[in-house]
Amino acid sequence: MNGFEVLTLPGKGRSMIARRPFKTGETIFEEEPFVSCQFSWNQTYGYLACDHCMRPLETSERNVQRLANDPSITLPLPEYCPTQQWMEQFTQCPQCGIRYCSEDCRIEANKKYHTVACMGNRRYDETHPINILNEKWKKMHYPPETGTIMLIVRILAMYKQSRDKEEFLETLKQFQSIVVNEELQIFHKMLGTNFESQLSDLFQTFCHAFSSEEFAMFLTPDAFKSLMGLIGTNSQGVATSPFAEWVRKVSDVDLPPQEKLQLDNYIDELYHKLNEFAGEFLNNEGSGLYQLQSKINHSCIPNAQSSFPYSNDILVLKAVNDIQPGEEICISYLDDCQLERSRHSRQKTLKENYLFICKCPKCEEQLKDPDETSEDEDDDMDMEDEDDDEMS
């Protein structure tokens, strides 16, 4: 029995409410995605991941060598590499060569969507309609990525392979939809200032890729906008990294103080090298639709947090504070740095990216704070420092 339920609350819509106590650190639920997919540019740049579950397909050592552009790097404690134990199980589709972390993933992908989505020997054919669609998307949506048209491609393949299409469509409808007057903001976020012409161009290419009669219900401008809006408002970012997972594991190893210090210093040096060559883009990244997670609201003082501890797309929600029965379970849509910024900055980011005004206790408490972004505050501080220098 779940320790929570989803209710519709006035002014908040669907919300997840605790029905039993959860202690700090306790797992609230684990969830596989309804669908997930690696980002298009992420794949193009050579981030190797299972095409089904996004598990990395390279060792921690090879991962850091590639991202630092230094093949001489060696990692100590290789037994803590999260992918080493999977290496012998790696496989691929015999028709198109797409790679999987295991035979189980290959079979599951075939069962859900890959029988339809497989492009066979045309996988790298630039004239294939799906490749044309993906390339058009990439030219409209440069990194840092927040979505991929390939998630919609996978959804349509799933629809075609589904035995009960009505049930499939009903599941799709369960994800939070957006109202019409919010769609333009979502498309602006996904495609930039020229979104109107780009959306039209993308729609035409999409129709060409899925011209079959069985996809007719998706081939109207409104249906396409709904699909785009769905992934724009509901998709959860997924990030897996064999190096980051290795760091997490070796950091918990009980070592003598001197060895621990040496290891920490070495890890710092590696991150410096990674930052110089790869910058912030260190992970296999993609997005997925999660039926439970999509029903959790935001708070600037969250009591729960999502993570991907298994180096794949399985989402784990854990309590970060004690949660009492009847209390709403909330996560933060902002990262830790953004949460520390001013109320005005947080509201600005949430409005631009998620189309709502936060009314959590922290925001309500700071309601009378100055309406200035944290950047404005930083500028004011810099000006004050300059004034102090001139007076001294």
Image: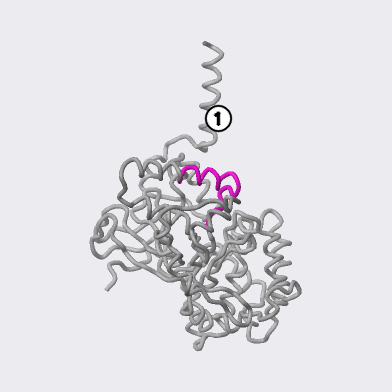
The residue shown at (30%, 67%) is 4
Q: Percent x, y for residue 369?
A: 43, 36
Q: Is residue 64 above or below residue 226?
A: above
Q: Percent x, y for residue 333?
A: 46, 54
Residue indicated by mark 1: 379
Q: Main secondary structure of the magenta part?
A: helix
Q: Number of callouts in the render? A: 1
Mark 1, residues whose alpha carbon is within 10 Å: few (<14), some, or many (≥20)? Answer: few
Question: Callout 1, which amino acid?
Answer: Asp
The residue shown at (74%, 71%) is 126
Q: Residue 139 occupies which quadrant of the picture?
A: bottom right
Q: Residue 42 occupies which quadrant of the picture?
A: bottom right
Q: Which residues are magenta?
A: 267-283
Q: Is residue 376 above or below residue 174?
A: above
Q: Is residue 269 covered in magenta?
A: yes
Q: Is residue 300 above or below residue 180?
A: above
Q: Is residue 195 covered in magenta?
A: no
